Image (cartoon, rainbow, N blue to C red):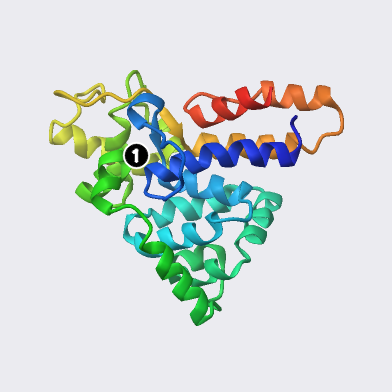
């Protein structure tokens, strides 16, 4: 059950639900963030590119990237990609080597070193699929990270504010930097700003009422766990696979727990 094909099938089913939350027109239930956890936009993009199958995702993801490029934290996406092993970067580049992705915005193509080579017909397909996506207003109501980026911009400040909604999350700089795929100094600077304006107290706890969310559903930890799952799926011996899967760090990764439960 833990073959690459099985892993792709299970992960894509979960990934599609997350993309419905962000506006994709798939006929499946969306991930309810208030029940299952917050979706990190860049982590979802990277997870999708790791296990992407042929189908509507090949056109709808480029359509989303073209429609909402200003909502993407390009630095986080770039850092996540560069942090991966060469094997996983190669896998992503192979999945990106399809016409619609060569028609994505230059800022996206630069991250993956893609050339603009899409035909007019490809651009027309992308434009057609853009019309099928949900409105930004509806996406902002379903996605807390998108909502906060519309308020505070696409930098790490907006995402850190998003994390303050998670119940029981320890607001420690190192952990936050790891979850947001940035360096400790950036997080430390933002935390000091938020304390100075009394958004956070001296213990980095949020002051005042907040809308609670249970955890991160898809985070950078989800991407690293997915890379481990891909590697483990290639093992010939079932015991090695089982050991690798059981040693995953599933904290801050509701996505990984859901996929793991389907595979065991």
The answer to whether residue 199 shows anywhere in this view is yes
**Count of numbered circles on the image:** 1
The residue at 30%/39% (across/down) is 142
Q: In the rendered view of the protein, which quadrant contains the N terminus?
A: top right
Which sits in the foreground, 163 or 177? 163
The residue at 68%/54% (across/down) is 91
Residue 81 location in percent, x, y?
Answer: 55, 52
Query: Badge 1 is on which residue?
Result: 187
Q: Secondary structure at mark 1?
A: helix
52 sits left or right of 154 in the view: right
Residue 243 location in percent, x, y?
Answer: 74, 22
The residue at 44%/45% (across/down) is 19
The answer to whether residue 181 shows anywhere in this view is no
Where is residue 247, by image quadrant?
top right
2 sits left or right of 220 in the view: right
Instruction: Decide: few, some or many residues near mark 1? Use Cα within 10 Å; few <14, some 14-19, many ≥20.
Output: many
């Amino acid at each position: 059950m833990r073959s690459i094909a099985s892993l792709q099938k299970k992960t894509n089913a979960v990934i599609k639900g997350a993309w419905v939350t962000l506006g994709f027109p798939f006929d499946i239930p969306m991930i309810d963030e208030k029940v299952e956890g917050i979706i990190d936009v860049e982590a979802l993009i990277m997870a999708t590119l790791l296990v992407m199958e042929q189908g509507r995702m090949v056109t709808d993801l480029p359509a989303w990237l073209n429609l909402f490029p200003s909502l993407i934290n390009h630095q986080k996406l770039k850092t996540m990609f560069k942090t991966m092993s060469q094997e996983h970067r190669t896998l992503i580049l192979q999945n990106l080597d399809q016409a619609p992705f060569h028609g994505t915005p230059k800022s996206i193509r630069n991250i993956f070193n893609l050339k603009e080579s899409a035909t007019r017909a490809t651009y027309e397909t992308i434009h057609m699929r853009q019309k099928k996506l949900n409105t930004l207003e509806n996406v902002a109501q379903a996605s807390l990270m998108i909502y906060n980026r519309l308020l505070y911009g696409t930098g790490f400040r907006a995402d850190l504010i998003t994390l303050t909604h998670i119940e029981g999350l320890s607001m420690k700089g190192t952990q936050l930097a790891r979850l947001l795929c940035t360096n400790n100094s950036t997080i430390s600077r933002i935390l000091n700003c938020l304390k100075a304006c009394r958004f956070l107290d001296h213990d980095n706890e949020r002051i005042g009422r907040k809308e609670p969310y249970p955890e991160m559903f898809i985070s950078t930890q989800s991407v690293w766990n997915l890379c481990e799952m891909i590697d483990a799926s290639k093992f010939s011996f079932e015991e090695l696979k089982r050991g690798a899967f059981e040693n995953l760090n599933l904290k801050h990764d509701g996505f990984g727990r859901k996929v793991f439960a389907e595979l065991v």
